[in-house]
Image: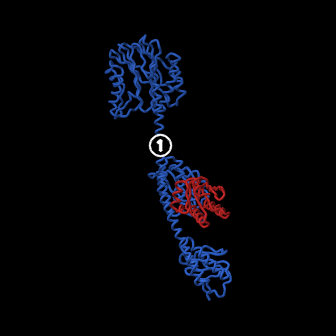
Chain colours: A blue, B red
Amino acid sequence: MTQDPPRATWSAALAKLGDDDSEELLAQEALAGWLADNGCDAGAVYLEAEPGQLVLEVEAGEVGLPDKLEGEVPSTFNYRPLPGGVLLFRGAPPDHLTEIGEAGFVIAFSARLASLKREIKRAQFEAGRRDVAQEALYDVGLAIASTLDVEQLTEAILTWALSLLDARRAALYLGDSGGFRLARSLGGDARATVVPYDASSPPADVLPGASFLLAAPIEVEGRAMGLLVVGDKESRSGVGPFTAADERTLSLFANQAAIALENARLHREALEKERLEREMELAAEIQRQILPKVIPSLPGYELAGWNRPARQVGGDYYDLLPRGEGRLLVTVGDVSGKGVPASLLVSTLHSASRLLLDRQDLGPELAEKLNRHVCESSLPSKFITLVVGEIDTARHRFVFVNAGHNPGVVVGADGGVRCLAATGVPLGLIPLARYQMGEADFAPGDLLCLYSDGITEQADGSSEEFGLERLIQTLESHRTEPLPQVIAAVEAAVGAFAAGAPQGDDQTVVLVRRMG
Amino acid sequence: MTESLHLNVDRRGELVVLYTEGYINNQGGEKIARQAYELIDQGHKTILLNLAGTKIVNSIGISILIEIIEKMIEIEGKLAFCSLTPTIEKTFHIMGLTQYAGIYPDEPTAVQALGT
């Protein structure tokens, strides 16, 4: 015989339906009431979630029952069927209890409603989570694109990776196909380096202690530049493996990270280039300061100098240094190579030659000291060709040392041409090298030209060089013109010969002419 | 970013401010929940979670925070958050936490709004 609680109790309880969480409360109250009325101390309601699968929905008292009921009902419990489920209760079932009747319907109905409500809540949560993931992926692009700082970028990438994938741990490696170095890890330690990898099976100990790993390569145009690894996907019950959807998300995320990291790299390179350019400009300015800012005057003589480096800074050098009493030192030097290394040696040459020339007269001993200094302060592969000579306006004589430099040229007013050959080896090659002096007389109208090999070795498109002959011809053709015009003529002749071919080396021309 | 969540508790009469530092995931969320339930058991009904030290929250952490919110509703208490990163604030909006819990830009604003 069925004995239900008074109908009014259930009616009142049912009237509460619709309030927030009232179903669960109602199911619990109904179950507790029924258990109490029937002398039972604990009970639980399982509802069929899927065919053959009973899930614990409501419990009252200390039941100690599993979340899912599989197989036999625990021996300490009795049971009665419910619509869509089963009621388990502990305690002596009263003899009269054969059917649960209306009470069972209320319990089952309210429990089912509570279950559905939880399902809806879960679905809403999942939908929200998907929205978050979608928004996050969008935000990731914006957020990581808004910073070009690699430190900030790696933190942002890892933060998002953890959050999006519910991962407990994450690490980001950067490098190239030769190997990756740990840039940052969150949630725990990570291996310092990862050698060439297969993203589908990252090293098992990449995140020491992690049970589950997922990795995605960070690639730009097929070039590996990093590896993103996450470990241990979280759930309320602990950690587990990542899903196929997680794999797609991580891959998508790695693609965006790759773009951001590449942008940061390009930005860094641009900044570095800009910095180098600023420094080069400064170096060029310093080198310009080394060259004579004004052409000194020398009674009875005209002087001119011109220099054009092949790059921002160069290895050519010239100097015009008045010595008093109608004398002036002319120097033209050429450091092997060009660019910054050559320009550094130019500075050394300038300082050393100025100091030495300030203390002693030009002669073999000065050249030998200069040579030793260059030997000691430059790399073995570096050397300097140099011609330094003194014009004596009293004797109209040019006394010089030519350390392996291109022969100077004197184009005479009489049409004759003389070459001032080397009197020693280039500076910096042989520490104990000896030098001799050479000399040339200046007749009225004689034009002396000292130059660097950037002039005579300028090549045209077919690699033919401008050569000494063409230089002499140009000097002869313009011999009587104002010196700036003669230099302009040389520059124009070399340029016309090159016919668009790039300037191969630094170019320097110094002219000295005795007035007629 | 610390490896695990650190939690500091500041009791100010009726109001209790919980300061988090680190990842609010399963472990971090459980830590907050344990503390919150303990406070509720002690009779506290107004809790402010200051998340200034937290940059990451995952969905497991959020689900635990939702449970705390539900518990607070059940006891007719108040739970609020303050000092959230823009990302976390956006996540809370999408996940619907803002329907049941106040979100404030900083602690003084939150304390004033909670009226404690």
**Residue denoted by label 1:** A269
Residue extending farthest left: A477
Mark 1 lies on a secondary structure that is helix
- How many numbered marks appear? 1
Q: Is residue A8 left or right of residue A411?
A: right
Residue A108 visible in the snapshot: yes
Subunit of mark 1? A
What quarter of the picture does the N terminus of chain A occupy?
bottom right
Instruction: Please provide percent x and percent y for residue A313.
Output: 45, 31
Please rate how many residues cluster around mark 1, counting C-alpha atoms within 10 Å: few if below 14, some from 14 to 19, many from 20. few
In this view of the protein, which residue sits in the foreground, B53 or A256?
B53
Q: Residue at x 33, y 14 (%)?
A: A414
Question: Picture quarter containing residue A305?
Answer: top left
Residue extending farthest top: A394
Q: Indicate whether A467 appears above or below A18.
A: above
Q: Indicate whether A340 appears above or below A395.
A: below
Residue extending farthest bottom: A1
Residue A206 visible in the snapshot: no
Q: Is residue B34 left or right of residue A125?
A: right
What quarter of the picture does the C terminus of chain A occupy?
top left
In this view of the protein, which residue sits in the foreground, A63 or A435?
A63
Q: Indicate whether A493 appears above or below A127.
A: above
Instruction: Please provide percent x and percent y for residue A171.
Output: 56, 54
Instruction: Please provide percent x and percent y for residue A456.
Output: 38, 27
Instruction: Please provide percent x and percent y for residue A128.
Output: 50, 63
| Dot 1 amino acid type | Glu
Question: Picture quarter containing residue A208?
Answer: bottom right
